Image: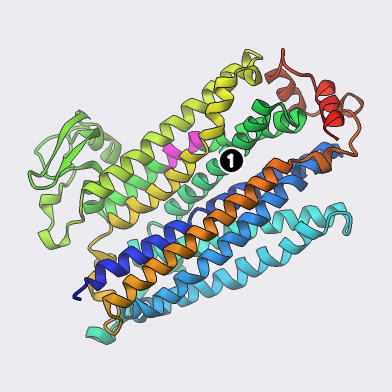
Amino acid sequence: MDLNTVLLSRIQFTLTIMFHYIFPPLTIGLGALLVFMESMYMKTRDPGYRAMARFWTRIFAVNFAMGVASGIVMEFQFGTNWATYSRFVGDVFGSALAAEGIFAFFLESGFLAVLVFGWDRVSDRMHYLSTWMVALGAVFSAIWIVVANSWQQTPAGFHIVGQGLAARAEITSFWAMVMNPSSVHRLVHVLIGAYILGGFFGMSISAWYVLRGRHPEFAHRTFVLSLVVATVFSVAAPISGHFQAEEVAEHQPAKLAAFEGHFRTGTGGTAMNLFGIVDEKAQTVRYGVAIPGLLSWLVYEDASKPVAGLDRFPAEDRPPVAVPFYAYHLMVALGVYFVLLCLVGWFFVWRRTLFRKRWLMALFTVSVLGPFAANEVGWVAAEVGRQPWVVYGLLRTEDGVSKAVPGEQILASIILFGVIYLLLFLVWIFVLNHKIQEGPAEEYAEIEPSSKRSWSWLDAAASLAGAGGPSMTEARGEQDREK
């Protein structure tokens, strides 16, 4: 059987990394929510915030465990399926991944034990510190992974040692490698995507509780807090995306052309395609709607200056267009949806009817799928748009695969990993559903009614949003009946 080892190796890596990437953004996003909740507790000493943090810590721990389990496989693939690539980037990746292990993973996993098991065993200040360290550890992990990946997009701070298959990139400046042209922009965008996911995840579970009439006080508080986070970062996403697109236009113009379905360089301003169907054979976007000059204005702040099309690059150096085009435009469309949905949420907060709008609560419940999808397709657009290079301008993807691993073995591993990942995913869903169904009832059991506690701005906002619905005192009565 003659199988395409390059294609199969790419499919396997896509399978493993897309499955793994379900979990790190959610870990980062939930870490921010935990810091927010414990900060409110430390400021107000309201046990309701502590109870919120305890519930979300359990969710966080489940997701963290899945992220660790699913991430190990990728490191082995570097040595099996991508040996030539690993030899070429080993000096760069070795330093970045070592830093990730030392400064991020050990920090996060070490303090995670205190975060999960330290309730009522360590002081509040120590537990608060552990929450910060876990959240920062997740961010530090993202920093080093994004640095390593960004170096593949925009290599810097290195020179080439050796020739042919023995060639490798050797670091000449560690900080130039770390601060390569795309690192900061890509890191900011990755973190924003993670915080959007964390916010929508919190709103999804809270909205589900509202629909079921369970844990109203917990649901109202968590929803408003999550709505704040989701709104801030949903608005920040297009701003970050604009600056990242400018960087792509400067350093990876072929990728930008693929994102926009821009095949031929014109003589005047370049239009931006809002949507359409890519026809790579005819080199056009059919049935599309485009805004004249908009791409030129966004890239150069000059609507009359042409943006380079794919015809400016040799045919063998052009990325495929369809996948990056659709993935990029889906990510942008989802970003617009997040902003609009958050604004609708705040409109009904202002109208004091948010939690009475069951259709809106149902929409928020399912909308958590959007940030998951946006994070995934954003990665797809960035990585496929880099093709045919695995290290941009230096090493082609077809030259990076291992020469000793036959396609039959790769295909067998894809099938086995597919089965294992399906089982892991079902376990994750089962455990997560159990935690959500169980709810925060145990944490709220010993809390006095909210009418006897000092209110914070979050309580005020939640009460305002639910005006006309169950009051905070009634919410407490519902908790008592459940117990």
Asked which quadrant contains residue 346, the reply is: top right
Pinpoint residue 302: horizontal percent, then vertical percent.
24, 34
Looking at the image, residue 290 sits to the left or right of residue 383; the answer is left
Kindly identify the residue that appears in the image at 43 percent across and 43 percent down. Answer: 374
Q: Main secondary structure of the magenta part?
A: helix
Q: Is residue 184 above or below residue 43?
A: below
Q: Nearer the viewer, residue 138 or 221?
A: 221
Asked which quadrant contains residue 405, the reply is: bottom left
Pinpoint residue 98: horizontal percent, then vertical percent.
54, 75
Q: Amino acid at mark 1?
A: Phe
Q: Give the position of the C terminus as an image quadrant.
A: top right
Q: Nearer the viewer, residue 373 or 456?
A: 373
Looking at the image, residue 362 sits to the left or right of residue 333; the answer is right
Kindly identify the residue that appears in the image at 22 percent across and 47 percent down. Answer: 322
Q: Is residue 45 magenta?
A: no
Q: Is residue 140 above or below residue 373?
A: below
Which residue is denoted by mark 1 in the rendering? 201
Pinpoint residue 50: horizontal percent, then vertical percent.
81, 43
* Any part of residue 394 in sight: no
Q: Nearer the viewer, residue 164 or 348?
A: 348
Q: Give the position of the N terminus as an image quadrant.
A: bottom left
- Indicate the secondary structure of the residue bearing disc 1: helix
The segment highlighted magenta reads 234-240
